[in-house]
Amino acid sequence: MFNPKSMKAEEFISHEEILASLKYADENKNNLELIDSLLEKARPKKTEKGWHCEGLTHREASVLLACEDEEINRKIFSLAEEIKKAFYGNRIVLFAPLYLSNYCINGCLYCPYHLKNKNIARKKLTQEEIAAEVAALQDMGHKRLAIEAGEDPKNNPIEYILESLKTIYSVKHRNGSIRRANVNIAATTIEEYKMLKEAGIGTYILFQETYHKESYEQLHPTGPKHDYSWHTEAHDRAMEAGIDDVGLGVLFGLDKYRYEFAGLLMHAEHLEAVHGVGPHTISVPRVKKADDIDPEVFDNGISDEMFLKLIACIRIAVPYTGMIISTRENEETRRRALVCGISQISGGSRTSVGGYTEKERPHDSEQFDVSDTRTLDEVIGWLIEQNHIPSFCTACYREGRTGDRFMSLCKTGQIQNCCHPNALMTLQEYLTDYASKETKEAGEKLIAKELTNIPREKTKEICSAHIEKIKTSDERDFRF
């Protein structure tokens, strides 16, 4: 029985409810009157406190996803862009993954780190190697990382992750520093989530891969990840342990995309119902080729057009949640995704263990093939060309604007008073310390233009003064 407030995975992700929602969507996918009412319901409304969005339920959003009418689809993409602009403006947050270890005891059929793969080179970074990787990432200009590690209690115990976090935060290379380290590691206990919280992590990220329980168990035949309930209930344990920000995601292509879409939104509804705050981020990876993984084996692949519609419908359903796209996707797909909902992207990524200190991109320990192989500076320049503000801001995390406090500020629009100037100041840091001549020139023109868009005169004055200090001194890390 479906119950979003239940703490049991099979009740807040109800198979029967998903099937009923998909049936309802099929029955109403041509009900233009209903669809227009849903689009109007989801449209941003201007209030005295700022923009407000109601969002959509998993069942309502499933109707939009199922609709095949071309005119309606144009309206869906237009609304997604409108919502994105209302709450995120033209800012795009940058991050990079940092792979600590690819030792893993699970048998996941879609991941080359699985235990039975004897071809891949197994690696685990020492603390000295982690420091070198972090310095290399700082020299690129990164301030925000997502830590990745396989599940292996012997090689990658929680103590190793905690020590690695301490190392990451300790490295201060030139003007660089890592100001937020998000963590993407296997489902664990409340006690260990408390340890991660105390270590100062940003977001705890865990992808479901698939919400279809039968498929999940088939795709995870061996190892601790085989336990569907333990994995699906992990975000609840993390939030119970005090981690305010959690990230969801599915691996599109493993199972039917409409089923995954409904399950993903149900999970978001569950977190909101139980903890008073939904997911901080939602990621949308697709199955990609890797060492011994052929994506053609999975017969649920989706076209680029449907992938982009999924992103647009997620944005409409959960308007306040950050959305992430990685270098799994190529430049053109990422460009289009930015318009219809994505607010965070990775740049200059290497998905191998120890890859950032290598001159040439290594492939022997990659988790997946990277489709967008551009350097971070090339990505920054590309964003600026499209009038996006590349942001390295981590201020909310360090100012305590997390969890329900962040969502409250986001829902009232007050977060804009912080995010826009913070984005400009962190962009100036990048331009001064790391950018190519061309990127610096284009970026400073963008900053000059965007300063005029700060509504509060006092904020504009302070932001302008900080930007001048960044240009002319080694002072960094100003924030609102």
Image: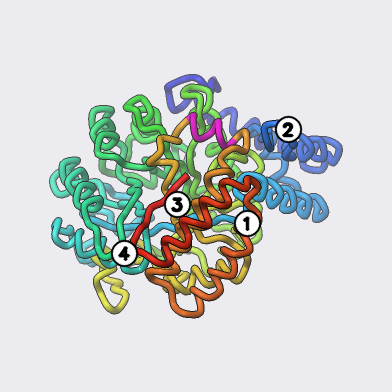
- Frontmost of labels 1 and 4 is 4
| Residue in the picture at 31% in, 51% down | 147
Which element type, helix, strand or loop, lies under badge 2? Answer: strand
Residue 308, numbered label: 1
- In the rendered image, residue 249 lying in the magenta stretch gets the answer no
| Residue in the picture at 41% in, 51% down | 478
Q: Which of the two discs, 4 and 2, labels the residue nearer the N terminus?
A: 2
Q: Which residue is mark 4?
A: 137
x and y percentages locating residue 161 in the rendered image: 21, 46
Three-letter amino acid code at the position of disc 4: Leu
Q: Which residue is mark 2?
A: 47
Depth order, front residue of 149/3: 149
Q: Main secondary structure of the magenta part?
A: helix
- In the rendered image, residue 405 lying in the magenta stretch gets the answer yes
The reply to whether residue 101 is visible in this rendering is no
Badge 2 density bin: few <14, some 14–19, many ≥20, Cα 10 Å:
few
Up-down relation of residue 147 to residue 14 (above or below): below
Badge 1 density bin: few <14, some 14–19, many ≥20, Cα 10 Å:
many
Q: Which residue is mark 3?
A: 393
- Frontmost of labels 4 and 2 is 2
Three-letter amino acid code at the position of disc 3: Cys
